[in-house]
Image (spheres, rainbow, N blue to C red):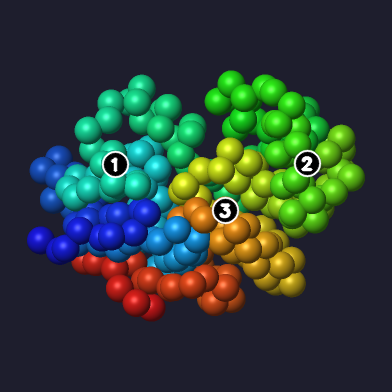
């Protein structure tokens, strides 16, 4: 067995298999760690299981073998209810399709994780405003999503992912719907904010340009993971 990773996020001997006999491996022997403030990009061919790996890291999918831990706490012993509470407090998501709610303002979309955690005090509004400034959306808090560009919507998604200061940020093809120049700015912004917050970030991407902005690049394949 591989030595247990030492980072904020630890992934040890992770495997995901399907089939009636649980023998068809999507991936196996996956071990890596992510330090606080580090952005790790994961590349891989289509169908190799990059999004499945992210789902395992988020506790949305159960691995067939191995362990995921965050700040020394293993996910394997948590039931569905505990996992849902853990995700709400500990994980921030950035998706390719933005997933903003069209009937809420920009500020309300960013505030959603805080509201779900029951944080309704005055500091919530200040935290939202601070992050909107940090991602270059100052003055746009009262706008509706339909009035924003794709790059601006992805900045909303980044602010929403970080507003509750989660130790783990997961980004699934966050630049897939953006033009190259906007994509570069968005990835740089995501990396800056992750480093400022001291979160561990795993970025899944097909883009070598996006991966180049990460601190470390790994390549996932069926039988393991290693430097790209």
* Lower sequence index among marks 3 and 1: 1
* Lower sequence index among marks 3 and 2: 2
Residue at the image point whose x is 75% and y is 45% from the top: 130
Residue at the image point whose x is 40% and y is 61% from the top: 35
Q: Which residue is mark 2?
A: 129
Residue at the image point whose x is 29% and y is 68% from the top: 225
The reply to whether the C-beta atoms of the residues labelled 3 and 1 are less than 8 Å apart is no
Q: Which image quadrant is residue 32 in?
A: bottom left
Q: Which residue is mark 3?
A: 197
> Circle 3 sits in a helix, a strand or a loop, which is it?
helix
Tell me the quarter of the image containing the C terminus: bottom left
* 180 left or right of 149 in image: left
Residue at the image point whose x is 19% and y is 50% from the top: 66
| Separation of marks 2 and 1 at Cα, in angstroms | 32 Å
Could one spot residue 176 in this view of the protein?
no
* 192 left or right of 50 in image: right
Q: Nearer the viewer, residue 175 or 83?
A: 83
x then y, percent, for residue 164: 58, 38
| Separation of marks 3 and 2 at Cα, in angstroms | 16 Å
* 78 left or right of 84 in image: left
x then y, percent, for residue 213: 57, 73
Q: Residues within 10 Å of mark 2 (few under 14, many from 20)?
A: many
* Lower sequence index among marks 2 and 1: 1
19 vs 46: above or below:
above
Q: Which residue is mark 1?
A: 73
28 vs 156: above or below:
below
> Circle 2 sits in a helix, a strand or a loop, which is it?
helix
Q: Residues within 10 Å of mark 3 (few under 14, many from 20)?
A: some
198 vs 218: above or below:
above
Could one spot residue 8 in this view of the protein?
yes
Q: Residues within 10 Å of mark 1 (few under 14, many from 20)?
A: few
């Amino acid at each position: 067995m591989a030595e247990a990773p030492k980072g904020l996020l630890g992934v040890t001997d992770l495997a995901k298999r399907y089939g009636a006999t649980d023998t068809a491996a999507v991936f196996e022997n996956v071990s890596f760690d992510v330090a606080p403030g580090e952005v790790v990009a994961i590349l891989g061919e289509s169908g190799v299981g990059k999004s499945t790996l992210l789902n395992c890291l988020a506790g949305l999918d159960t691995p067939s073998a191995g362990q995921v831990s965050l700040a020394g706490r293993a996910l394997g012993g948590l039931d569905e209810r505990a996992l849902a509470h853990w995700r709400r407090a500990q994980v921030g998501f950035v998706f390719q399709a933005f997933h903003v709610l069209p009937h809420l303002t920009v500020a309300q979309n960013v505030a959603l994780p805080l509201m779900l955690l029951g944080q309704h005090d005055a500091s919530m509004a200040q935290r939202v405003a601070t992050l909107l400034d940090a991602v270059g959306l100052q003055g746009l808090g009262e706008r509706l999503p339909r009035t924003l560009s794709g790059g601006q919507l992805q900045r909303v998604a980044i602010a929403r992912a970080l507003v509750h200061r989660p130790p783990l940020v997961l980004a699934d093809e966050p630049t897939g719907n953006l033009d190259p120049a906007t994509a570069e700015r968005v990835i740089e912004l995501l990396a800056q904010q992750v480093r400022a917050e001291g979160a561990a970030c795993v970025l899944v991407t097909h883009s070598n340009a996006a991966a180049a902005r990460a601190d470390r690049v790994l390549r996932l394949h069926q039988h393991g993971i290693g430097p790209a």
